[in-house]
Image (tube, rainbow, N blue to C red):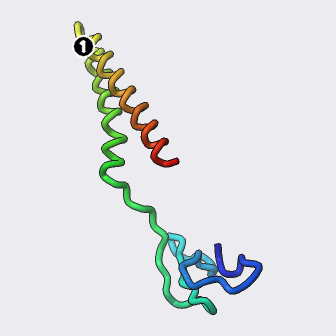
Amino acid sequence: MSPTDLAHGTPSPGWYPDPTPATLEFPWLRYWDGGAWTAEVRAIVPERVEPMALLIAIVPLIGLLGGLLVVARPGKRLTGLLMMAVGAASWVVIQAVLSAVSR
């Protein structure tokens, strides 16, 4: 949304996508003071990944990949299959919880 997109009234002061042509690597936000664009800008950069989100993504993969490695060993097929099942089940549970929380 930008101040020029609004049909009625003056938009409130705030950060909006920069209406000037993009000349830099990242898209920019420019501050609208309620009447004009200011010289203040800031880059729109992706948010950093939280460590817990990374852990949530990695734990099920460790179970699945570890299970695959163990299955390849003679006499350890059942152990490997159990590891893979636990990894897959944990991924399903994590996805269900994240889905419920985001509603």
Judge from the rendering whether residue 54 lies leftward or rightward of residue 34; answer left or right: left
Q: Nearer the viewer, residue 17 or 7?
A: 7
Quadrant of residue 22 in the image?
bottom right
> x%, y% of residue 53?
36, 48
Q: Is residue 75 above or below residue 19?
A: above
> x%, y% of residue 26?
50, 70
Q: Is residue 62 above or below residue 21?
A: above
Q: How many marks?
A: 1
Quadrant of residue 71 in the image?
top left
Quadrant of the image containing the N terminus: bottom right
Residue to which mark 1 is pinned: 73
> x%, y% of residue 55?
31, 44
Local secondary structure at mark 1: loop
Residue type pointed to by label 1: Arg
For label 1, count other residues whose C-alpha is less than 10 Å away and answer few (under 14), some (14-19) or many (20+).
Answer: few
Q: In percent of the image, x 37 and y 41: which residue is there?
A: 57
Q: In percent of the image, x 54 and y 71: which residue is there?
A: 27
